[in-house]
Image: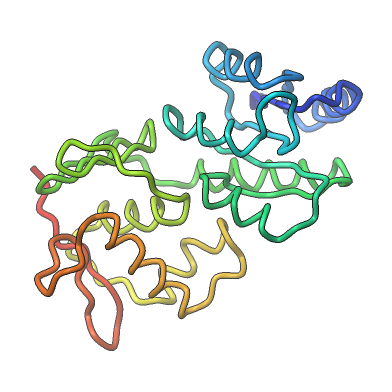
Amino acid sequence: MSKILLIDDDEKLGDLLKEYFSRFDLDLTAAIEPEGGLKLLEALEPDLVILDVMLPGQDGFDVCRTIRKTSSVPVIMLTARGEVTDRIVGLELGADDYMPKPFEPRELVARIQNVLRRFADTPASKTELHYDGLEINTERRAVKLDGKLIELTTMEYQLLLLLAQNPGKNYNRDEILNELRGIDAQLFSRSVDILVSRLRQKLGDTGKDQRYIKTVWGTGYVFLGHEG
């Protein structure tokens, strides 16, 4: 049974989802405020977190940012606000999916199952990767460059991990799109170039002699790092 943590101040929603989720082998624990939710995150080590944007005292975006500093647990964000910017901000901060309120419980279950399946399908790998000053901790989803922690969005991190786990392999744009569409279904070919450019800037990889990511003109991108 998968353990799900809900952080939402709507107690009735928590009660409803707890009963409904049990039909799908999902064990829900609910917290109605951020501090309690973060304590439960540490104590329960859930398989997935459902996080509301509108919370008392601290909004869900801040909570998501806090979670991402120490955990790679999948996060689905909920909001009653329909702005596209909310969705973008959530994904940029490290959320893995986004669900507008009101919603059908069955759709939320489907999204949970999809995210859990996506994470389960990720091939087993080392918990730490080291490449010429670059350190990737896959358990904490933390990346350090020359000993300093750098903040990456979910898509930037997943792109870096894809490339770094397969150094020397040339990935074309279509292959990268297929890997990242589960995070943002609206990605398109030009977005890959923009995403790579943003990642390079954060890695300080903007000179003529690329340190980590090389463009293979006309085809795609290859990771240059040598593990050590």
Left or right: where 120 falls relative to 81? left
Left or right: where 138 falls relative to 144? right
| Occupied quadrant, residue 18 | top right
The residue positioned farthest toward the front in the image shown: 57
| Residue 182 point in image, percent of width and height | 57, 58
Left or right: where 173 falls relative to 147? right
Q: Looking at the image, is 107 positioned above or below residue 41?
A: below
| Residue 71 point in image, percent of width and height | 45, 29
What residue appears at the point 41 percent right and 66 percent down from the top-left corner? 195
* Type of colouring: rainbow
- The quadrant the N terminus occupies is top right
Q: How many labels were placed on the picture? A: 0
| Residue 60 point in image, percent of width and height | 65, 35
| Residue 46 point in image, percent of width and height | 58, 23
Front-most of 81 and 114?
81
What residue appears at the point 55 percent right and 70 percent down from the top-left corner? 187
| Occupied quadrant, residue 34 | top right
- The quadrant the C terminus occupies is top left
Q: Looking at the image, is 170 positioned above or below residue 38?
A: below
Left or right: where 102 falls relative to 66? right
Q: Looking at the image, is 219 positioned above or below residue 16?
A: below
| Occupied quadrant, residue 130 | top left
Front-most of 199 and 115?
199
What residue appears at the point 24 percent right and 40 percent down from the top-left corner? 144
